[in-house]
Each structure stands twice: as C-alpha cells, then as structure tokens.
Image (spheres, grey):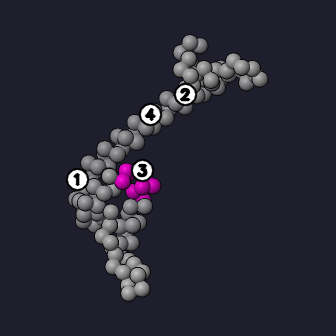
Amino acid sequence: MIVTPLRTDGGHRVYNESHLRALGFIRRARELGFTPKEVRDILTLGGPGNACCDEVRDIAAHHLQQVRAKMANLAQIEQLLAATIERCSGDHAPICAVIDMIEGGAEKH
C-alpha cells in the first residue's frame, strides 16, 4: 500500500516521515474498520495531505453505510438472543430454546 522504502547496505529498510505517516494512517483506518480496498483507494487518491476531501468523503460515506448496516444486523441478533435466552428455562434438560433458535425453529415458539 505504500512505496517500498530503500534499504541500507546492510539490508535494513529506511523509513522516512512520509512512510511513517502512511503506516500510521493505514493502522488507524483499519482500526476504524475500513477495508484494505478502501484504504488502498484513499491512498491511491494521494493519501494523507494530498487526497481531495470530496473523493475521500465518498469512500467514508460508503463505509459509514456499511457500519450502520452491520450495527442494525447486530441489534437484531442481540434482540433475538436476548428474547431466546429469556425463554430458555436453564434446566438440565434436552429441550432448549437456544438450540431451537439456532436450528431455525425459533419461530415455532
């Protein structure tokens, strides 16, 4: 994703300030959940300090839509699990609402 730094005669890579900035940018973008493709796209646009805000904004807006969709999906899963656990007796018995829900039978109860 970044320009390969030069090597010393001993074979060690020499990272300059722009390499370090790009590496920090990549790490933080990944922490925020941007995909490798999204990060690469931003870097292709010029990366930190060079990319035009309107193009980066479009990538970020698309990422935000994906994050919100995942959050909505997780909220549905949370509600389903909470409701199923509430129905589960917790007894030491072979009949279990959680097992039924996982198998796809939750709608029967």
Name, please, the residue furthest toward the front. 10
- Mark 2: which amino acid? Gln
Name, please, the residue furthest toward the right. 92
User: Disc 3 vs disc 4: which is toward the camera?
Assistant: 3
Q: Quadrant of the C terminus?
A: top right
Q: Position of residue 88 (x, y in %)?
A: 67, 22
Q: Secondary structure at mark 2?
A: helix
Q: CA distance from mark 4 to mark 1?
A: 27 Å
Q: CA distance from mark 1 to mark 2?
A: 37 Å
- Mark 3: which amino acid? Gly
Counting labels gives 4
User: Disc 3 vs disc 1: which is toward the camera?
Assistant: 3
Nearest the viewer among 56 and 103 is: 103
Q: Secondary structure at mark 1?
A: helix
Residue found at x 37% / y 50%: 35
Q: CA distance from mark 3 to mark 1?
A: 20 Å
| Residue 8, placed above or below residue 21 | below
In contact (CB < 8 Å): disc 3 and disc 4:
no
Is 50 on the left or on the right of 79, as rendered?
left
- The magenta-colored residue range is 28-36
Residue under pointer 1: 54
Q: Earlier in the sequence, mark 3 or mark 1?
A: 3
Residue under pointer 2: 79
Mark number for residue 72? Answer: 4
Nearest the viewer among 68 and 101 is: 101
- Mark 4: which amino acid? Ala
Q: Secondary structure at mark 4?
A: helix
